[in-house]
Amino acid sequence: MSQDSISAPHPSPWLSVWLAPRETIARLSAGNPRRHVLLLAAVATIIELAAALLAAGAAIDFALQPIAAVLAIVAVLYGILGLYFGALMFRWSGRLFGGRATQAQLRAVLAWSLLPRILAAIAFIAAVVVLRYSIGSDVARQVGAAALVLAAVALELWGWVIAFLMLAEAQQFGPVRTILSGTLAVFFILITTMLFRTFAFQPFNTPSGSMMPTLRIGDYIFVSKYAYGYTHYSLPFSPRLFAGRILGSEPQRGDVVVFRLPKDDTIDYVKRIVGMPGERIQMIDGVLNIDGTPIKRERIADYVGGEPCGSANPRTRQWHETLPNGVSYDTLDCQDNSFLDNTPVYTVPAGHYFVLGDNLDNSTDSRSLSQVGYVPLENIIGRVGMIYFSVDSEAPDKPTRPDRIGRVVR
């Protein structure tokens, strides 16, 4: 055998992808483009989730919480599904410009371009740890953190360059078609995300304590948009394309809902529905009365922490209330004989609902006709489903609250 017939072994794609991305994806496509792609997608989402949690104020011991395992599983599933969905979008856009890459090849492109982003997220985590937890002079910590942040930015940018070069090789495109097809794919992804947000679930956060103890300041919630159908308020920017509800259904008593404020429909409120159309609602000595009948109410242990009444008092009286349809929840009682504890009788108009905050003495709700009043069905955006993230935004270091993440809202 002649010496010329002996070829040098190919370097590992873990090394070659950094400086020879086109050659790397060509070799992977000719061999096994599925190799390591799921691993890269899973690791990338877990590391980026950890970086996001740390940036939001999560303590280092967050990983010891039981919820961490659940979040890791969700992150892995999200990363893998996102990989398949992204490859599908890039395949559709590529075919419009004559691209030849298969979905397996495009998954490889997307997965291997995540490698620099994984290291970028690790560098960012290291920067946060250096600033918050390392021992040393302030100058040394700031210089070290700045260097790590610069490295993270450089790695992130290089990841985009690698993705561009590998996409061009996989699709057999020049620079112009690569840019056009990639831009179109990103547009498809954004449109799909917007449609999901419009018709399925939309995230909100709670900036006030009016719904304590059910919702606390710093809770991030998912709202089911399809629970009651859709109005023009369901659409981005709320264009008045139609009136009423499409595929509508009636909210139930006790539902926690997000709605547009009737007095100013640019503002979102979150409250609990307690009064249905045609009913007579009244507060008597702090007790909700529906059609002249008080609801069931029993005293439970005081609520501790959070300052729900806007004072330094760490303890607040707490009640467990049950509505006529059996829905139960806890409410707070800041003081006796507040100006909202005794009200006139409110008769709920047809097509409207009466809403209260669970923090009864510290909530602007339907009891204030001049500020909120009765909520039209058309103004209801959706039903609050779950707390997907929570951070104590009032604390100096803004720690996360792992015990609230994943909690179903009732």
Image (cartoon, helix red, strand yellow):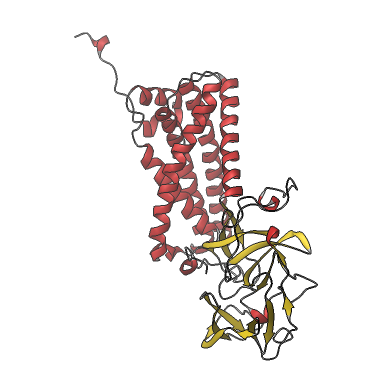
Q: For this rendering, which residue is in front, 155 or 110?
A: 110
Is residue 236 left or right of 56 when viewed as pictured? Answer: right
What residue do we see at 38% from left, 59% from top? Answer: 69
Q: For this rendering, which residue is in front, 336 or 87?
A: 336
What residue do we see at 41% from left, 32% from top? Answer: 108
Can residue 136 be seen in this snapshot? Answer: no
Q: Is residue 362 above or below residue 299?
A: above
| Residue 210 x %, y % | 65, 74
What residue do we see at 29% from left, 20% from top? Answer: 8
Q: Is residue 377 above or below residue 181?
A: below
Q: How many marks?
A: 0
Q: For this rendering, which residue is in front, 22 or 251?
A: 251
Is residue 87 left or right of 344 when viewed as pictured? Answer: left
| Residue 322 x %, y % | 53, 80
Q: Residue furthest right?
A: 370
Q: Which quarter of the rendered picture does the N terminus lie within?
A: top left
Q: For this rendering, which residue is in front, 199 or 348?
A: 348
Can residue 186 be seen in this snapshot? Answer: yes
Q: Quadrant of residue 68?
A: bottom left
What residue do we see at 60% from left, 25% from top? Answer: 180
Q: Quadrant of residue 248?
A: bottom right
Q: Is residue 226 above or below residue 314?
A: above
| Residue 20 x %, y % | 44, 26
Q: Is residue 312 above or below residue 222?
A: below
Q: Residue furthest left?
A: 1
Is residue 94 left or right of 272 when viewed as pictured? Answer: left
| Residue 265 x %, y % | 75, 59
